[in-house]
Amino acid sequence: MQGQDYNLDEIIFKKEIIIVDYTGISLDDQHPVAFGKRLFFNALEEKGGKVECVTQWRQSNQKVNIVLGTLHNIEIMGLVSNEVSGIPVRPEGVFYQWQKTESGTVLVVGGTDAKGLMYALNELAERIKSHGLVALSEVENTVEYPENNVRGLDKFVTDQNDDNWFFSDDYWQYYLTSLATNRFNRLTLITGYNDGKQQDFMIPVYPYLFDIPGFENVSLRENLERTPQEYLNQLKHIGQLCHSFGLDFVFGIWGHGRSDELILGLPEDAMEYTNYCARGMYELLRKIPEIDGIQLRVNYESGVGGFGNTADNFWKEIIKAIVKSNVEGGDVFLDIRAKGLTDTIREFIESTNLDFSVTSKYSWEGVGLPYHPTEMRFGELSMLNNVDKRQRYGYADFLKYSRKYDFIYRLWGIGTMRMFTWADPDYARRFSFSSSFGNAKGFQVTPPMSRKQNTWPLFQDQKRVYYQWEDERYWAWYLMFGRLGYSTSTNPNVWEREFKVHYGSAYRDVLKAYEAASKILPLITSSHLTFHPANYNWAEIESGGALFVEHNANPYYIEKKRTYQSTEPGDPGIFYGIEVYVEDILDKQVKPKINPRQLSQRYADLSKKALEALSKVNKEEVPENHMNEYVTNEMDIKILSNLGFYHSYKIKAATDFVFFKKTNNKAYLKSCLSNIKMAKEYWVKMLSLLDKLYFEKPRFLHDNGTWKDRLVEIEKDIEKVENLIGESNVKLISHWDNSDWVDIERPSFEALVPEHFNIEKKLEVVLKTDKPFESSKENPKIHYRSANMAYGKFKELAMDRDGKNYKAIIPFDDIDPDYDLLVYFSFMSKNKNVVMFPGLLDGNNELPYFIIKNSNH
C-alpha cells in the first residue's frame, strides 16, 4: 500500500507537514533517535517543508501526516498492523505503515526499538534528499529486520600519527554518521596490532591511559604529545558518541606483550606481569564504562605465550577481571578471536556465564570470493593439532549445534583491498547471506585504508583530492556492506540514488564497471594465495610470484621458495594450483576443480566487462563537482582491469612453463615467453596509471615494496626464459592452442536437495538435467562434508543415472549430526573442464554449495 489518498496538497503544494512525535526524545539529545530525527527534519526543511511537530494527536488542528515512534509506545502499537505487532518483536526492526485514521491517512514511521526507528528515519531522509517531498507519498508498507545481528567495523589505532583523527570531533561526527546511516551497529577500536614486533605503541595499552594501583612505578619512557589522561578522556568520548549513533563500542586489545623499550617499570616476574595486566583490564572497564565489549587476541601474536602454546593462565586472569567488573555493575561482553583459543579458555569463559563470541576470519587474511572456503590449505590441514593453525582462518570446528557461544565472521581486508575503490552489491549481498551460516551472529569487516601509516597522503597529485578524510573516498564500500549487511533484500535504489549523485546520468555504466572490476581482487585471493599473512602478501601490489624463485621481488616469496606456478589456491577444494593441474593432466587424472584455463578466462572476462562499461561513460554527464572523484575512480577500475589481464596471461605463461619442466619440451617455452610478455604489457599499463595518481611506495603497516619492483621481477623472468630457449628452432606448442578445450554449452541443472537431514533416514539427493551428460564419460559427482573444516576435503560419490536424472545416497557414517552438511555437484566435460553446481557466483544461488541442516536442530 502507498499513500494514494495522502494529504498531497498540503505536502506538495503547501509543503505543510504535521508530525506526531511519540519518541519522547529531544532533537538536542545525544541519542540514536535524536540523530535520526535531525536527519529527517533537516531533509524535510531543505526541500521546503514547513514542519509542525506535536507530541499528542490532539495538539494539532491540522490533518496529521506522519507519526513517529517505537513499539515501546502504546499509541504506535495500536496504530500498526499485525504484520508488525503480531509477531515476536526482534531488535532493530524498521517499519513504514499506512493507516487510515479520523484525521485521514497517516504514515507511521517506526522501529521495534530506538535503533530501528533511527534506521527508518535515516532512510526516509535519504529518499527525501533524492526525490523531494513527494518521496513521502511513494513509501510502501514495509517491515524489515536485520539478517545479521552483528554488523561491525574494525578500526585500528596505529601510532601517534593517528592523533589527528583520533582526537577530531569533526572526524568522529562524519565517520559515525556514515556507519549509522549505513546500519552498522558495532565499532571495534583496536590497539596493539603490530608487525610482529614486541615493542610498539599501546602494547600493553594500560600505561598509555592511566596509572594502575599497586604498580605506580610503571610509566612511559617518553612523554607523548598527548597525555594518558587525554587518551582516556577521548576513549570515553568516542564511546559516548558511538552510543548516540546506535553503535556498540568495543575496545580491541591485541597486544599484551612487554614493550620494555617504550615502558619503564613493567614487572619482571611473569605472575606479577599477569597481575599487572589483569588489574589494568579491571581499571580500564571501571574508568571507561562506555565500553560495551572487549576484544582479545589470545594467540602468540599477542606477545604472550608461544606458537601453538597459548598462555591459558594469563588469559584466565584477564577474563576474571572482566567478570569482576561485571559483578560490580558492568555489562561488558567478550569478543575473543579464534586463533589460539584453547578448549581450556573457552570452557573457563563458559563457566563464568560471561556473554562471549568467538570471532574468526571469514576466509584468510584477505578478501576472497563471497563464500566460506571448502578446504583448508595444506599448511593448516597438516597441523590440525595446533590451535594456531587449525583456527587460523575460516570457521574451523566452531559451528557445532551444541556450542555455548556466539560466532562472528571477520572479513579481513588488509591482504587484498587497501587503496583502490570498490563497489559490488552482488558481492556484499552474498557475503551478508553467508554471514549467518552455521547460525552465526553476523560479521565484522576491515575497511580500505586499514593500517595505512598516517604519514603520507593517499594521492601524490593533491589537485585530485576531493575529500577531507581519506575514508570518504570509500563511501560505496561502507554503503554496500552496511545496508546489504542489514538485509540482502535491500532495494537497489539505496545505492543507485547515491551513485547518481556522484556520477549523474552515467551512474549505471560506472556501477557496471565497478561490479566487474571489484571481483578481480577477491578472485586472486581465492584462487592464488602466494603467501598467507596479510602484512607480506597484498593482492593490489603483488605479481603473484615470479616464474623463478630467485627473481621474486617479495623477499618472503624467496624465503618460502614460492613461484607463480607453485602457489597454492586460497581454496584448494574449488581451484587447481598450476603445478598440480599439469601433473594431473599428464597423468590423465584430472580432478573436478576450476582449472587454469577456466581461471584465466574468468580474469579476462571480468576485465573486459569493466572496460566495456567504462567505455560507455559520457564524462559530460558526470557532475562537475564530482569530476575529480570520477577521474580517480576511473583510474582504479582501469588499474584493476589491467591487473586482471595480467593474471590471465601470467596463468598461461606459468602453465606452459610447468609443461616444459615436466616434459623437457622447449616448444612450451615459446608460448610461455609470448604470454609473459603480454602479462608485462598489462603490468606496464598499470604502472602508467599508478604514476599519475599514487605514490611509488605506499606505506602501510609493513614495507611491501613497489609495483616497479615487480616489473623488474617480470623482466628477469623474460630474460631467463629467452636464455632457456636459446637458438632453438622448435615449433611453438601451448596448452592453450587447442580450441577444443572451450565448452560450447552448459547443461541446465536443478538440484533436489532436502533442507534437513535425519540420521535415522537415508539422505538422497537428485540432480535433474535437461538432458543426460552425453559429452562426459563419467556421471556427475556429489561432493559433501559436514561444516567442520578440520574434517578436511569434501568426500565424493559418483551419482547413478536414472533417466535424465542422477541420484546419490550420502552414507550415514559420513554425516556428523552436530553440524550442518554441505553439498555441491560436479561433472567433467569431454574437454576436462569442470562444471560445478551451484557454481561460483551462480545467478540463482548465493553460495557454491547447498546447506542441509539437522532436522533436530
Image: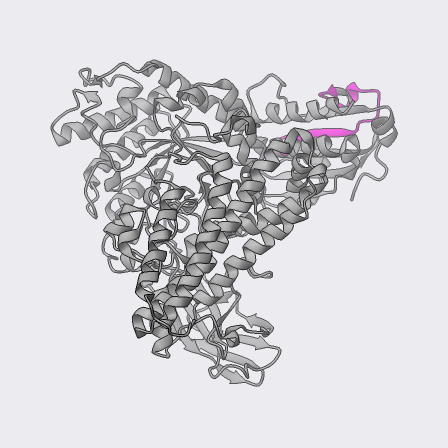
Q: What residue is shown at x 73% (from left), y 29% (from top)?
A: 67
Q: On screen, 602 above or below 452?
A: below
Residue that lies at the very extreme toward the front in this rendered image: 727
Residue that lies at the very extreme toward the left in this rendered image: 269
Quadrant containing the C terminus in the rendered view? bottom left
What segment is highlighted magenta in the picture?
53-74
What is the quadrant of residue 198 in the picture?
top left
What is the quadrant of residue 36 in the picture?
top right
11 vs 412, left or right, is: right
**Residue 245 in view, yes or no:** no
What is the quadrant of residue 50 in the picture?
top right
Q: On screen, 678 above or below 595?
A: above
Q: Is residue 54 magenta?
A: yes
Q: On screen, 599 above or below 267?
A: below
503 vs 660, left or right, is: right
Quadrant containing the N terminus in the rendered view? top right
127 vs 575, left or right, is: right
What count of labels does the image hold? 0
Q: On screen, 807 above or below 354?
A: below
Q: In terms of depth relative to the viewer, which is nearer, 562 or 220?
A: 562
**In x, y percent, where is residue 808?**
47, 78
**Residue 104 in view, yes or no:** yes
Q: Is residue 244 magenta?
A: no
**In x, y percent, where is residue 828?**
47, 76
**In x, y percent, where is residue 189?**
40, 30
**In x, y percent, where is residue 342?**
25, 47
Q: What residue is shown at x 47% (from left), y 22% (from top)?
A: 240
